[in-house]
Image (spheres, grey):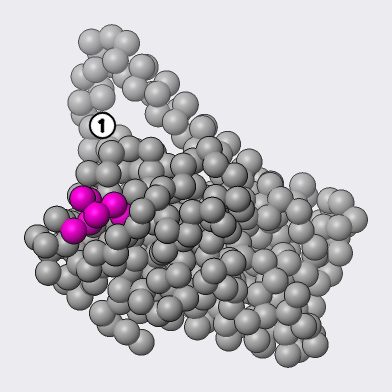
């Protein structure tokens, strides 16, 4: 596996200033001395930066897909955009991975259509590591609002490959997100999924309830994109609310402020534990390359961590692991790609 991976970076992605993306790239280069960057963006942005950094190659794009544009239409009309050019860089093997904090829908559409899916994959899925003492892989988190039962089976295989290669769990235990632990819980569709998981998913341990999300009961939790996206945003909103309320409580009196001073290190550790920036973004699994989608309101730290994580996933063979598990699954069930 390539120890000197090339990660394409969308310099124009995100709601914040381009300088935050560039700072994240610089920090990633400093942390990973074998990393190489293909920096995609406006000429006046990427060429001066590349001139100052030996392991950066510029790739000039001429348009930007905005957050409020319809993804499918935008990637067709703006093939010279940084997102579409990043997808083509993967397809043409100019890069091994791609990081963008731009439009999630546009990155999903561009990499699915122009880069292509791994053979046998029916639907790509977005995964993220839930924060905790031991990160939990959860997917899908927004790529597929509608699904067929066999799609969730493939998500389980892709999540298993992710937990092995990126998190380092040797035998990931898989759960199906549902409203109860019993096999007969949930909709008829989820009950059908449960049966398929029992037959086809190694290390399937049953239904996962909402209370299991941070309990380390499972290593991989599988759901559909709509449920997963709502769940993730609920977690993020709750964490933000609790940290704000905690800060207000600790600043409410002199006695509370003294207590906060004594707890300062522990509070910083808690804040870092709940900070999504430490993971860089969500992984798009199922396409022919490592793809990480950062938050639109990304930070330099998130960009750096996303790029470094992409390089690690390339080195650990994430795409190859997914391809192997999907091929084994399709061979055993006689499934044909559709």
Residue 57 quadrant: bottom left
Q: Residue at x 38, y 43 (%)?
A: 14
Residue 151 quadrant: bottom right
Q: Nearer the viewer, residue 45 or 248?
A: 45
Give the image location of residue 141, x and y in percent. 60, 52
Judge whether residue 306 is colored magenta: no
Q: Is residue 91 shown left or right of residue 24?
A: right
Q: Which residues are magenta?
A: 41-47
Give the image location of residue 3, x and y in percent. 28, 82
Rate crowding at label 1 as few (under 14), some (14 to 19) or many (20 or more) other CA atoms within 10 Å.
Answer: few
Q: Residue at x 46, y 42 (%)?
A: 66
The chief SS type of the magenta part is helix
State which quarter of the image contains the C terminus.
bottom right
The residue that label 1 is drawn on is: 263
- The local secondary structure at tag 1 comes to loop
Give the image location of residue 149, x and y in percent. 80, 65
Q: Is residue 179 shown left or right of residue 246?
A: right
Q: Is residue 180 shown left or right of residue 280?
A: right
């Amino acid at each position: 596996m390539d120890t000197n991976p090339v990660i394409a970076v969308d310099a124009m992605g995100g709601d914040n200033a381009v300088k935050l993306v560039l700072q994240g790239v610089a920090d990633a280069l400093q942390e990973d001395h074998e990393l190489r960057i293909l920096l995609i963006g406006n000429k006046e942005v990427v060429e001066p930066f590349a001139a100052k950094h030996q392991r950066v190659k510029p790739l000039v794009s001429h348009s930007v897909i905005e957050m409020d544009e319809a993804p499918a239409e935008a990637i067709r009309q703006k093939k010279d955009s940084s997102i579409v050019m990043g997808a083509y860089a993967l397809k043409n093997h100019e890069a091994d991975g791609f990081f963008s904090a731009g439009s999630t829908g546009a990155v999903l559409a561009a990499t699915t259509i122009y880069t292509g899916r791994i053979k046998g994959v029916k639907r790509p899925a977005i995964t993220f590591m839930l924060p905790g003492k031991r990160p939990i892989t959860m997917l899908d988190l927004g790529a597929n609002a509608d699904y067929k039962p066999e799609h969730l089976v493939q998500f389980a295989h892709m999540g298993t490959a992710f937990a092995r290669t990126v998190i380092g769990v040797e035998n990931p235990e898989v759960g199906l997100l549902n409203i109860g632990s019993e096999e007969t819980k949930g909709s008829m569709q989820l009950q059908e999924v449960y049966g398929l998981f029992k037959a086809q998913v190694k290390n399937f341990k049953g239904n996962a309830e909402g209370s299991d999300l941070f309990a380390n009961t499972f290593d991989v939790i599988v759901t559909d994109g709509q449920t997963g996206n709502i769940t993730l945003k609920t977690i993020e909103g709750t964490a933000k609310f609790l940290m704000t309320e905690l800060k207000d409580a600790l600043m409410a009196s002199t006695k509370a402020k003294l207590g906060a001073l004594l707890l300062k290190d522990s509070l910083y550790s808690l804040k870092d534990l709940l900070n999504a920036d430490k993971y860089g973004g969500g992984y798009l699994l199922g396409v022919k390359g490592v793809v990480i989608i950062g938050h639109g309101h990304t930070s330099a730290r998130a960009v750096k961590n996303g790029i470094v994580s992409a390089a690690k996933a390339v080195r650990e063979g994430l795409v190859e692991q997914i391809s192997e598990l999907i091929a084994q699954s399709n061979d055993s069930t006689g499934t044909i790609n559709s």
